[in-house]
Image: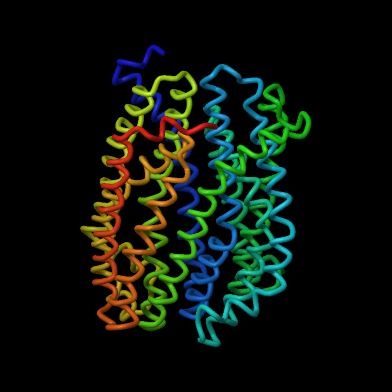
Amino acid sequence: MTEDNDPTARRKRILHLALPLIGGMISQNVLNLVDTGMVGTLGDDALAGVGLGGFLNFLLSAFIMGLGAGVQAMASRRVGEGRDTESAIPLNGGLVFALLLGIPTSALLVSTAHVFYPWTIDDPGVIAEGVPYLRARLLGMTALAMNFAFRGYWNATDQTALYMRTLIVMHVINIGLNWVLIFGNLGAPEMGAAGAGVASMISTWVGAFMYFVLGLRHARDNGFLRGVPDRATMRTIARVSAPSGAQQFLFAAGLTVFMVMVGELGKRELAATKVMIDLMLVGILPGIGFGLASATLAGQALGRRDVDDAEQWGWDVAKIATFVVGAIGVPALVVPELILGVFLHDPQTLALAVMPMRIIGLTMVFDAVGNVLMNSMIGAGDTKRAAVVSVAMQWLLYLPAVFLLGPMFKVGLVAIFCANLVYRALQSGVYVYLWRGRKWADAKV
């Protein structure tokens, strides 16, 4: 490749892949913030209910969302090997898994949401707002799984612009439906927080339909929907995807446990934390976007059997991601009150969030490096070790610290988010060590 020793060409290659991903993820953040702003006008009960409902939806959908990692790792390796006409075969397998896992799981969870949602909080007002919202979101689980499988394929084949365009259309539809369904505009019933869930579910299914149309247009020659994948392909997808899916599930479970423990401090703390996490994603998800680009670049390099180049892509992407995410974190450090004031209307709730928001601004820089190198390992097919690090650091280090600082001693949000800063920095250090070690190059996909 001509960019092998040309820093400018390498930067252009990184940005070509990453910018559409980041654009799509920023649009996701904008949607989250618009959701939060609209629901926030309904009061703290609705905001807390949607916050917990969103985390539970992430938790319950996380395992099958891991299909995207398996599809991307396999498809990018085949592109690097010059087997473009077979690159969509892993996508077919991912879609089969999405249907087999998504439909029965969604049906079961929708019918039992009223039973398990109250396990997370005992406030009747929050439960009343949260259960209908969660049920609506869970109806989109199968479409969400298919969307992640498509995202893995578009990333692997350098077609990230298709992902961005589809996601933007989904979000425009979602925001419009929010306005209609939450507040009862245009003659629709006023559904409140539940309307936000229905809007998200409909937009997710619209996205899945759009991806199928794009697949027939852009991936048919590469094997899209041309027969059922063989057993070897399905086994490989399962083997590569399962650790990533388990990691995402346990990460989401950790976030849910985190929110439950924060809820022990009070409703204001829970509402403030919901807003801060949504804002933090504005900075973190671009880092993940760079990580997904690095996963493709590393996977394609390994397909060419160029381990040196694969490693260098990880470092090159990490440098750019650190600069970009660091710049995004500056407003959180300098003017947290202005940012938080858009979403938090209670003065006491706002005051609780100001210092933790400053700490988040620092945390994002460390997290960018970790996200890039973790996703680089996943792109190389080393999903098991990437998952072990993430799960161990979260469950054995951070969550015990939150328990001590929150429910046990009630030190407060500042101490909890300081612990988050330490946890993220240490985790990034571990991924740096593993990336240098190169054992990820031995993964078979």
Q: Is residue 50 above or below residue 84?
A: below
Q: In the rendering, at what x and y percent does residue 230 appear?
A: 73, 33
Q: What residue is shown at x 49% (from left), y 22% (from top)?
A: 303
Residue 316 lies in quadrant: top left
Horizontal and vertical percent position of residue 377 = 41, 38
In what quadrant of the picture does the C terminus appear? Answer: top right
Left or right side of 393 for 422:
left
Query: For the point 60% across and 63% down, which residue is it?
Result: 178
**How was the colour assigned to the protein in this rendering?**
rainbow
Q: On the rendered structure, is 244 left or right of 415?
A: right
Point 68% across, 45% down: residue: 208
Question: For the point 56% across and 44% down, which residue is it?
Answer: 241
Horizontal side of 347 relative to 224 (left or right) equals left
- The part of the image, by quadrant, that contains residue 184 is bottom right
Q: Residue furthest top?
A: 2
In the picture, measured across the screen, residue 110 lies left or right of residue 354, that is: right
The N terminus appears in which quarter of the rendering? Answer: top left
